[in-house]
């Protein structure tokens, strides 16, 4: 189980953005790049999976609006 | 004929019977005509005549039933009950009135638009942003309308995980504005409020879309606690409900597009983000390689330069040594003498060409 499983899609997207920003930052270290890349790749796959699994729950309200009740 | 039953009634009974007969004959009648002598008494009672080329009839209604601006010369359709008043005057008691024909609809639209605009209902500073990623939305529409099917399809394609509560209402006709107002009230009074209320309806004629220019509905949209998104008709249609909403969508499909992001676009972006990392790593490796290569090159250049410098120094020393070579002196014509330089002694004289043995016969100090 990945620790990312408890994160929302938005959190994962933000984390992916932070990871990719790291590659352009002064903190970039070649020795860590491969691990960070693998993490980003995994996050992107999870985001795709999560998004494709999302379904809307559509409910038609039972109350009638035809009269003033 | 003389035995014919004659009905004798009091005036009041006659009026009551006539009204009963009228009500039986015309429980509800719609009459189209042109408005004349329009006036509002005491801010409550509305009087006007409805006429055409062949006749005219007086009309009465309350100001609260007047949902759209009316003025003289406007062509309208009234829903009314004919009535004989206690003073013997025939009139129509109007329950609803709506403009008829493109000209009247446009005129009514412009009058109400100016009025509500003047009150600031359409002011940009009143507009609230829609939630970025709503989890709970309220939809007011007719579930049988094509616009609703388009909305749901686009919504499901683009995003998921939302609770979508749909209030099924009429979206055209005389009852539509009140039904939509009730649905707005319903969502605004929920304990768990939706984050946005979407009002949608597909395209139609100006008359079909007239419900969205109803004054009370427009006011209810403007007064909604929950931000509103209205997508009515086609792109070219603009209703007053659109203007009062926080956000206007051109169509129901466009409303779904404005409401939620496209999941496929987010997936594409995520893939692109990751794909863009590999060239960056490659670039970093290349930079590192170039850096190391440059360092090695510099080291090699330093060594080569030092070797060259020492070689040059050696060569210079060689040149100096070469100048000191005795053979070079002999070559210039000098001779080298070996032995004791005293009279009577034998010495060896070396020239470039030969070595001579000679006896010293004279010796003079310089």
Image (spheres, coloured by chain):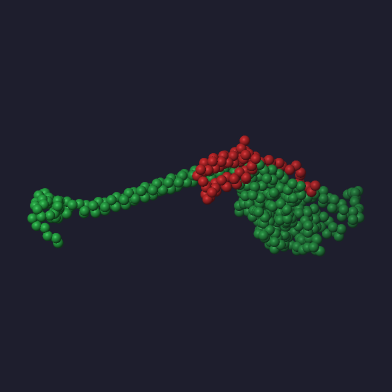
Chain colours: A red, B green
Residue B47's spot in the image, x, y percent? 78, 61
| Relative depth, front residue between B15 and A30 | A30
Asked whether B38 or B284 is in front, the reply is B284
Residue B319, how many percent across, how many down? 24, 53
Q: How many marks?
A: 0
- Percent position (x, y) of residue B200? 67, 48
Which residue occupies 82% across, 50% down? B23
Residue lying at 80% horizontally and 63% vertically, measured from the top left: B43
Q: Would you identify the image quadrant in which residue B36 lies?
A: bottom right
Is residue B216 or residue B35 the one in the foreground?
B216
Which image quarter is the C terminus of chain B in?
A: bottom left
In the image, residue A29 lies at what x, y percent?
51, 46
**x 14%, y 60%: residue:** B365
* Residue drawn at x 75%, y 59% as measured from the top left: B50
Q: Is residue A36 above or below residue B37?
A: above
**A35 horizontally vs B70: left or right:** left
Q: Is residue B128 left or right of residue B7?
A: left
Tell me: B310 left or right of A24.
left
Query: Which quadrant of the figure has residue B114?
Result: bottom right
Q: Residue most toward the top?
A: A1
Query: Is residue B32 in sight in this rendering?
Result: no
Q: Is residue B1 visible?
A: yes
């Amino acid at each position: 189980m990945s620790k990312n499983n408890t994160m929302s899609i938005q959190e994962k997207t933000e984390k992916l953005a932070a990871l990719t920003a790291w590659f352009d930052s002064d903190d970039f270290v070649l020795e860590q790049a491969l691990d960070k890349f693998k993490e980003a790749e995994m996050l992107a796959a999870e985001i795709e999976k999560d998004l494709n699994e999302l379904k809307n729950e559509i409910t038609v309200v039972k109350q009638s609006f035809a009269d003033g009740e | 004929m003389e035995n014919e039953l004659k009905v004798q009634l009091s005036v009041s009974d006659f009026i009551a019977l006539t009204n009963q007969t009228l009500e039986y004959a015309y429980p509800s009648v719609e009459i189209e005509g042109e408005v004349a002598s329009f006036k509002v008494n005491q801010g409550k009672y509305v009087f006007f005549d409805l006429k055409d080329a062949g006749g005219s009839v007086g009309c009465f209604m309350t100001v609260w039933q007047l949902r759209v601006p009316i003025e003289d010369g406007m062509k309208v359709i009234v829903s009314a009950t004919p009535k004989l008043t206690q003073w013997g005057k025939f009139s129509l008691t109007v329950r609803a009135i709506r403009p008829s024909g493109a000209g009247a609809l446009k005129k009514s639209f412009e009058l109400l638009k100016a009025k509500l605009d003047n009150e600031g209902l359409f002011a940009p500073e009143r507009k609230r942003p829609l939630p970025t990623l709503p989890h709970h939305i309220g939809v007011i529409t007719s579930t049988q309308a094509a616009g609703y099917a388009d909305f749901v399809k686009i919504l499901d394609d683009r995003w998921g995980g939302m609770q979508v509560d749909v209030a099924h209402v009429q979206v055209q006709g005389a009852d539509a504005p009140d039904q939509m107002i009730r649905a707005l009230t319903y969502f605004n009074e929920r304990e768990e409020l939706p984050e946005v209320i979407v009002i949608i309806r597909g395209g139609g004629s100006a008359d079909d879309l007239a419900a969205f220019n109803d004054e009370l509905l427009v006011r209810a949209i403007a007064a909604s606690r929950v931000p509103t998104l209205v997508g009515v008709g086609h792109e070219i249609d603009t209703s007053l409900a659109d203007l009062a909403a926080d956000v206007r969508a051109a169509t129901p499909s466009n409303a779904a597009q404005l409401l939620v992001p496209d999941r496929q676009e987010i997936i594409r972006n995520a893939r692109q983000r990751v794909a863009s990392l590999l060239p960056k790593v490659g670039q970093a490796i290349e930079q590192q390689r170039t850096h190391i290569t440059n360092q090695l090159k510099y080291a090699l250049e330093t060594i080569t330069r030092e070797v060259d410098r020492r070689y040059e120094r050696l060569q210079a020393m060689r040149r100096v040594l070469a100048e000191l070579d005795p053979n070079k002196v002999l070559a210039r014509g000098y001779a080298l003498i070996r032995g004791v330089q005293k009279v009577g002694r034998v010495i060896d004289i070396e020239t470039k060409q030969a070595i001579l043995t000679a006896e010293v016969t004279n010796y003079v100090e310089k």
